[in-house]
Image (cartoon, rainbow, N blue to C red):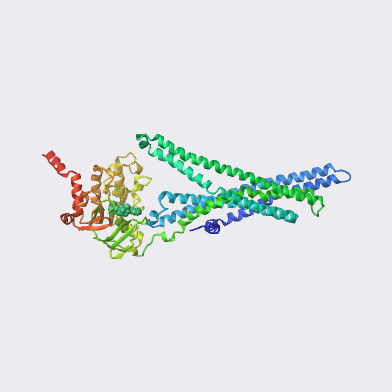
Amino acid sequence: MKMNIWGLLRNILPFVLPYRWLIVVTLVLTLIGSLMAQVNAVVLDRAVDAINAMMQQPGGFHWGEAVRLLSVISFILLGKEVVGAVVTFCQRYYGERMRILVSRDMSLRVVDRILSFRMAFFGSEGNETGKLQSRIDRGIMSMSNTVNNFFIEILPLFTSAILALGLMFAANVYVGLVALCIVPLYFWVTYIQASRMKGGRRGIFGGHQAVSQGILGIIESITVIKSFNREQTEAERQAALQQSMTDLQLNTRKQAYLFNGLKSFLEQIGTVLIIILTAYLVLIDYPGMSIGKIMYHVMLFANVSAPIRQLHRIYDDMNDALIYAEGFFGILHAEDEVEASGKHHPAEVKGDFELRNVDFTYPGGTQALFDVSLHIQSGKITALVGLSGAGKSTIVNLLDKFYLPQRGSILLDGHELTEWDTQWLRENVGLVLQKNHIFDGTIEENIRYGCPSATHDDVVQAARQAYIYDQIMQLPRGFETSALQLSGGQQQRIAIARMFIKNPPIIFLDEPTASLDAIASEQIKASIDAIKKGRTVIIISHNIGQIIDADQIYVLQQGRVVQSGSPEEVYREGGLYKEIFDASASSMNVDKIASITSSAEH
Ligand code: ADP
């Protein structure tokens, strides 16, 4: 989605509209503030002319008159300052309020959207965790800054400039025209500056990121760096990064200062022209011109040219906003990424899955499954066997509707998976992965995540079923202990307890013990055996001991089903399964283990 300025405004508008009253208040304040900005010029014009008139009086001036005049001037100028201070305060406060509220709304909106997206969205290019996060962060920051800038800088500055220009025209058309002719020059200089400095700021931003990532990288890999004596190499790499950053920074600064000088000079040329013109008009006695008017126009012109100093920054901010808006609103408008759901919502889910000629390719382009057909019977244990990368987890991803296949069909209890109510399907499926996510929270909260309405007794019951209750009770704070403090094996059992409390009829176990040591695996085996009872279970495991309990085995090789049947049948058939089975047994040195355990028994 290519964004232009109108697109940007159209997209931001829905976030700003709820705060209409804030906009109205800000606009009124802006108008008052802009009027206040012109007061100095008007007062000075009147004061100079009044003093001048006083001095021209034939009999000399009266002190009383002079004091009265000065009192009025002082009162107006000081009063204006007080009003101006209140207006500026309110303007900044309301502008900031708007920025904060808009950025909150944007964050909430984007979180809602992200939660609704299908899995494929997260795997697509540009949506990896880090990138997605920075798209969101920068988008929100830049959008809300734009809103803030608009209300507390752009709008007041430009309103005041337009008002001042109007007053100049009203007082004298020629002076107004001269002032107006200088304005395009400002835009021109700003344009030149922007194109000269293009990329500078962004380069510096990127450089800062690279430098800090480099330092993080050093800290993370300090053991490797030291053990290979690569301190010098790393230092040189950082030095090179820093050097290019320094050059870029210095260059950008130099350009900025040059342009600042040029802009001040232009401003001064404008002022000089105005002085010459107004002085000339006064000298030729042009109607309506007076000495006071010289001051009047000079001061008004200062307001006309005030935005020039900010113009470049505004231009930069707008450019950033346009770039980041593309990434940010791209997420909000990604309608086709929203997860699809059907309506099928039966009271009872049996768990009879059937894959028919399924082809599946990941968003990244890897084809993971080729013409896969298999049948998972309800109430039975089905094991998926194969080497790493064979496509086992992919099948589980498809069965849980995380992804949709490109070809073929998947049926659950006779209905196409696409027809199923996605939430209801997942309500009936439990997933235990190799590494389960433990949230930052207590053990009790982590178990209850499986069923938010569960009571404490339910949580205790689930912990017992997962064989983790006794260990929890030995902790000083019991169920109130932070779950992140538990060992890997204990966390895995918390995840299994979460499954028990959810109590789904279908369970997918994807290498639930792969990252655990032998003792932990053995302990978890008991909880897994308990979980299997009376449910449809699909298990993926490299642990032969867990596979041979299965009722049915499917052997996968490079995305294709190459063997299927009961464990004994498939073993007898030979082929890949026998290879894996024998290798697994010999790697465990089963014969020797058997002789050791039997000799120890005798
Ligand atoms: P297994 O579970 O049998 O080890 P997977 O199903 O995880 O295998 O992977 C099958 C193939 O799909 C592999 O080539 C893997 O690289 C690829 N793959 C797995 N997950 C993704 C993903 N999220 N995005 C892209 N490719 C993936």
Q: Nearer the viewer, residue 439 or 261?
A: 261
Q: Is residue 539 left or right of residue 286?
A: left
* Residue 564 figure quarter: bottom left
Classify residue 150 as left or right of residue 519.
Answer: right
Q: Would residue 529 appear left or right of 274 to someone viewing this image?
A: left
Outermost residue toward the right in this view: 59
Residue most toward the left?
A: 602
**500 and 315: which one is in front?**
315
Name above or below for residue 513 compared with residue 412: above
Residue 7: % across, % down? 53, 59
Q: Position of residue 445 (x, y in %)?
A: 36, 47
Whether residue 167 is visible here, answered yes or no, is: no
Looking at the image, is 222 positioned above or below residue 271?
above
Q: How many marks?
A: 0
Q: Point out residue 261 in the picture as x, y percentages from the top left corner.
A: 64, 44
Q: Name the residue located 42 percent from the left edge and 55 percent from the top edge.
A: 114
Left or right of residue 559: residue 333:
right
Look at the picture and state if 572 lies above or below 76: below
Please state the horizontal and vertical placement of residue 151, each as a whole percent of the image: 59, 52
Q: Is residue 434 visible?
A: yes
Query: Which quarter of the rendering shows the C terminus?
Result: top left
